[in-house]
Amino acid sequence: MTDTLRYDGRVAIVTGAGGGLGRAHALMLASRGARVLVNDLGSSAAGAGTDTGPAAKVVEEIRAAGGEAVANTDSVIDGSKLVEAALDHFGQIDIIVNNAGFLRDVGFHKMTEQDWSDLYDVHLLGAFRIVHAAWPRLRDQSYGRIINTSSAAGIYGNFGQVNYGTFKLALHGFSQALAVEGRARNIHVNSIAPAADSRLTRTVMTPEQLAPMRAELVSPLVGWLTHETCAETGSLFEVGGGWVSKLRWQRTRGERIGDGKDFAPEQVRDAWPAIVDFEGAEAPADFAAGMAPFQKIMEGA
Ligand code: NAD
């Protein structure tokens, strides 16, 4: 390590920072000079109730270590209140870490519309409302660093997590599209899919399994991605236990079937081995690259 990455003069909002991953992110950013709005509603792992204690405690920890922070106990669903609070206390916003969330795991056949909409509200609507309220300022100051917290449950799909997985992957869609709009204004937006010891994972894994997965082993990636010298944007990373990896979309070379006027399901069946063969696959890096095969067809190639 040559130099120290610092956030002096920067203001960060970290949501759900009263415990688990959010707490670790807030402590890390504050220890390196950021002023932090420590947001946490203080609800249970299933999203019930409120408690002002967790956010206040993390603020105490940050101050005891010589850092600057203020507690906020609004729900992320009232996103603009968090943005107003950061502006009231610190006068600016540079970094947003959308991390708050909870689980309502249940088989899809038993899932209620409430299980669906509560998860939508906290994960996707909350992130949207915070970023939407802050966006004009980020654009005006031509600076912003945003992290959206996704999940392996969204990337790969997991039993009992149709609600959670849907909105977690949608958060990466949010990152990708925001990254396109933010690029020219130096607003970088990335997603992380963490794996860490927290009250959410303690219900499904043993203390022994989780011992090497401290939340603090996720925060350094948040630190790098939210630093002013980091150019990465629109990307998705898996991170946990000190392991960090980047994901991307991959596409098979594909097959042109038929004469361009018509083709039948039988031809799709017959071309199937080629359609699904990842030998020689490509990884389109942006929308234009993604659209390239259709562009070629439209140009008559
Ligand atoms: P956690 O329960 O310790 O932390 C989540 C925090 O969010 C809690 O302190 C909770 O009070 C807060 N919160 C809940 N609803 C809120 C609301 N409406 N407004 C403000 N705060 C609210 O769990 P964690 O594991 O640290 O989870 C952090 C994020 O990481 C979540 O989005 C979670 O889905 C995601 N995640 C965690 C893991 C993991 O392995 N721990 C894996 C994938 C994704």
Image (spheres, helix red, strand yellow):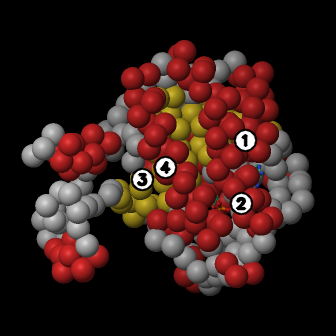
Q: Which residue is mark 2?
A: 119
Q: CA distance from mark 2 to mark 3?
A: 21 Å
Residue labelled with disc 1: 38
Q: Which residue is mark 3?
A: 236
Observer-side mark, 2 or 1, equals 2
Category of crowding for the residue at label 2, using alpha-carbon neighbours closer than 10 angstroms: few (below 14), some (14–19), many (at least 20):
many
- Name the front one of labels 2 and 3: 2
- Location of residue 132 with respect to 203 vertically, above or below: above
**First of labels 2, 4 by sequence position:** 2
Labels 2 & 1 near each other (Cβ < 8 A): no
Q: Closer to the camera: disc 3 or disc 4? A: 4
**Disc 2 vs disc 3: Cβ atoms closer than 8 Å?**
no
Q: Residue at x 52, y 58 (%)?
A: 169
The residue labelled by disc 4 is 173
Mark 3 vs 4, N-terminal side: 4
Give me the C-alpha separation between circle 3 and circle 4: 10 Å
Question: Residue, x 60% and y 37% (percent of image)?
Answer: 96
Instruction: Give the residue type at disc 2.
Output: Leu
Residue 220 vs 87, above or below: the answer is below
Marked residue nearer the N-terminal end (1 or 3):
1
Does 144 sit left or right of 186 as displayed?
right
The Cα–Cα distance between marks 1 and 3, rounded to whole angstroms, is 24 Å
